[in-house]
Image (tube, rainbow, N blue to C red):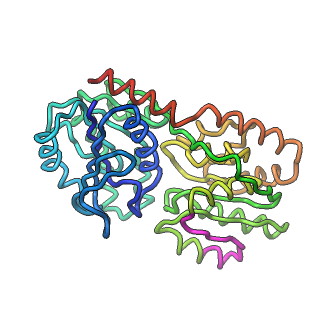
Amino acid sequence: MTILVINWQDWENPNGGGAELNLREIFSRLVKKGHRVILLCSRAPGQKRHDVLDGLEIYRIGKRNSFNFYVPASMRGLLRHNTIDVIVDDLNKIPFYSQAFTRMPVVGFVHHLFRSTIYRETNPLFATYVFVAERIIPFFYRHATFVAVSQSTADDLHDMGIQGHIHIVHNGIPVRSESLQVSRQKNLIAFVGRVKKYKSIEHFVEVVAAIQKERDVKAIVVGDGDAREGLMRMADELKARITFAGFVSENEKFTVYSQARVVVQPSVKEGWGLTAIEAQSCATPVICADSPGLREAVLDGKTGYHYAYGDIRVLQARITDLLDDDGKWKRFSSEAQTWAQNFSWDASADKFEAILKSVV
């Protein structure tokens, strides 16, 4: 097959995140299986207009804020000069509505629908733009097949009125070298992920400040984003001793997972808890908000805990429980590592390939 993928950015773009990690892991594997993959995405400063990465042929046009307006003409140009079998349209914040501009088979790939939570992330005007853009997805993708990364996202699509086929392809976890040897730190609490408002990392800062008033614990926030400076000011005001590590390499990220006693994920909503699964693959229990996406990634009372979103008192009690109870922590740690083994990028790529073949 020749597959045209339309995504906001590639994984070398500074704005890349979990969607771009998924893009790389799945479609580079499809290239190795003998398929041709063309990626149409936006161009960050310093990036080439045409590139080849991990076997994907990449065409970069427009900027991050204007890319969707360039897509229709650029897509038609690529279709004229290439024999495309199927289009994979990434529906992330602002859909590209590719099915309105072609009769080609289209697969809508959905990581996360913001819906009303977008109003937590940005100003009311842009939030309404995103909210309406998501609401009209059923009208523009009437005949599309959909792939969601979690049951929560699939349920959102159903609730919005999508009547067609919706397949679930979970994210995987990377195959890591067994040479990574680090010592577990019994008093280290970590958050790993993009530092965005909807991630509710202020809850992490608040609970760390409360715990540090009672005991000596370390805390780290791994990741970068536009909410970072505000969180650092909040930590100073609350006298919370937190290391804000910023963006780190994959090896450094997994070192933190392996060192931490627990990882906390307080987000109001996720497409799928990728960092939660990654942490559990390192035998680290995860305490997460009982939010869409996250609740599927963590087995409550087995590989970690769920707590009602925003309930700092319960979050504090759950963290303290796993800091103090070595026996329980060991059980959770073992269960977490076993559970994470159910997810692999090879399996995800195989399932995605089967869906594309069925559509073609």
116 and 299: which is toward the camera = 299
Residue 9 position in % (x across, y down): 34, 55
Residue depicted at 65% across the width and 74% down the height: 235
Residue drawn 48% across the image and 66% down it: 225
Determine whether, in the image, residue 360 is placed left or right of residue 151: left
Q: Which residues are magenta?
A: 234-248
Q: Count the marks: how many? A: 0
Q: Quadrant of the C terminus?
A: top left
Is residue 333 rendered magenta in the image?
no
Q: Residue at x 52, y 66 (%)?
A: 224
Residue 306: x, y in percent? 67, 43
For the N terminus, the quadrant is top left
Tell whether 272 sits left or right of 54: right
Question: Is residue 188 toward the left or the right of residue 325 in the image?
Answer: left
Q: Position of residue 353 (x, y in %)?
A: 39, 28
Q: Is residue 205 left or right of residue 316?
A: left
Vertical position of residue 161 compared to residue 275: above or below = above
Residue 243 higher or lower than 167, as above or below: below
Q: Is residue 235 magenta?
A: yes
Q: Residue at x 38, y 30 (%)?
A: 158
Q: Position of residue 38 (x, y in %)?
A: 27, 43
